[in-house]
Image (cartoon, rainbow, N blue to C red):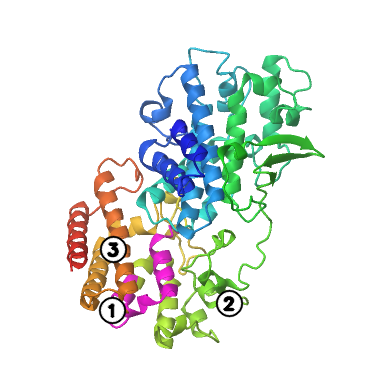
Amino acid sequence: MVHLLSLLSNQSEHLSQSALTRFALIARLLTQLLPMPLPLDHACKDSQCFWMQEMKQETKADLMRHLFLIARHFAAACFTLRAQRDTDGARVVVSAALAAVMDALLRRCLTDSLHGSLSSRHYAGLADGPCQPFGVEPGAFQEASETLLLVAPEYQALRTLVLDYFDSISRCVTNDHMIFSFDKGMMCGEGDCELVEQIGLCLGLDAARREAPQLLTGERPELLELFPELAWFRDTVFLWKMLLLPACQCPAVQKWRASDSSLKWQYKKGRFEVIGFQTTLTPEAKASKPGFLQGVLRWFGQYESDKKSLSRASPSVLTGSSQELVNNEDDVLFLKELPSFNGALGAADVELLLSYLTAPYLRIPLVLGFFADRHRASALREPQLQVILDAVLFEPGPWQSPSDLLSVPPETVPAPDRRHLATGAGLLFNELMRSPQSVVHAVLSLLQVAVEKDVGRPNSANDGLILYIIRLASRIESYLAFLVSHGRRGAYLERAGASYQAFVHLGSGRVSRRMWTLASR
């Protein structure tokens, strides 16, 4: 894999789609080939987790080195490509999956090599003496991933598995033992110093805690020479945090090679300084979100990666309300001005659509039924409404952790928050597993409208509408096929299960036949 990525990178001057090909290869590797690690406190982790099987030290080191090189290739490809809404979601989820696999490998203690597993024993909290496990926190990943456009079911499932894994770390590791929190600050944290001090004590290093920053950067080589996997893991986490927070200082969009992603670390004036991609990099998260609702309607134009935290299915974003948030139907009724969507919908329909969007848990059947109406389906010619419908379907929404799943239901109506309305695997998976009829019937109605509006010749006024409906139906069909293929095994949706499998299978076939009828005309 790394050899192939290197060939594509070295021949980028002669291959017009070199970066996109590398991006697709790595995304496929993480979504369809490499298994994700089970949570740390999973009951069957030792027997069922792929990364817990016995391996030799050289095998583990080779795996971590290759994953580190793949992470560098992925970062170079991401910074080469211009940000798009669908690829932005993929790059955040895939880079998080790389960090999760690296974390699982680093804490895998081997029985055949004591010295080679010294760093792993301390990281996993299994070393001799009083020690606790260490870990990496996902930072803003959970919140940022709620509004990512994940059009492929593999990305939605991968997000769930990554969140499950990092949530288990937060349960098993105390806050003072979290390391590499670069998004909170570029200082050397308490967890970093503690890990270096423990390993340094076993190696007999002088002043290990006082010079922990220099040992982590490699300015003092005694630590990273013996345990290069710590440097590989450090760089993988740093690149993930860079891709997670693109609003910070990021490299300019140009053709980058994997060699440009090599990070040079120094410790100056109490902070880590990282040089890569010919610039100084920092993934520190800002405390405030300036301009969150200032000029929000600009997202209808060219997509900007630093706007990915804005949900395109949020009525507050659609109305551009900088004074008050639109949280319920009363807020919609008191709006002084409604978006026009270039005249594609009337005022009453716009008000109804915004009201549906104030109920995120129910928005999928409501909005699909709204556009499945024959009198409104033609409005999907408008690109702004296409963006809204895509966001309604493919933004996963708030994530429900296993602990939230066991929590007591709210005792008052309305509930104080919407935590009980979160889902474990995304809103679309939740709808298809529990009530697929409404989704399948709405998609079939849209396909019937597309068939009726096909005049049999190209360059008609309905071309954009027909192509969009076919793309929408094919994406939903991929979710149906994913449920059918993985629902029984539970490999991806272990906590959620899969209901209505026979109906889902039938609905998937009906959607395929309708699309084939339309394409053959």
User: Dividing the image into 4 quarters, which one contains the N terminus?
Assistant: top left
Q: Which mark is residue 373?
A: 1
Q: SS class of the residue under badge 2? A: loop
Quarter of the image for residue 479 reads: bottom left
Q: Which mark is residue 473?
A: 3
Question: Which residue is at 47% across, 39% downward?
Answer: 8
Q: Is residue 383 magenta?
A: yes
Q: CA distance from mark 1 to mark 2?
A: 28 Å
Q: Position of residue 442 (x, y in %)?
A: 26, 70
Q: Residues within 10 Å of mark 1 (few under 14, many from 20)?
A: some
Q: Report the residue marked by disc 2.
A: 321
Q: Which mark is residue 476?
A: none
Question: Which residue is at 70% across, 18% downward?
Answer: 201
Q: SS class of the residue under badge 3? A: helix
Q: Seen in the image, is 482 located left or right of residue 513?
A: right
Q: CA distance from mark 3 to mark 2?
A: 32 Å
Amino acid beneath label 3: Ala
Quarter of the image for residue 353 reads: bottom left
In the rendered structure, which disc, 3 or 2, sits on the residue that comes first in sequence? 2
Amino acid beneath label 2: Ser
Q: Position of residue 264 (x, y in %)?
A: 69, 35
Q: Position of residue 312 (x, y in %)?
A: 48, 67
Question: Which residue is at 40% across, 81% downward?
Answer: 352
Q: Seen in the image, is 149 located left or right of residue 306?
A: left
Vertical side of 437 occupied by 145: above or below: above
The stretch in magenta equals 368-397
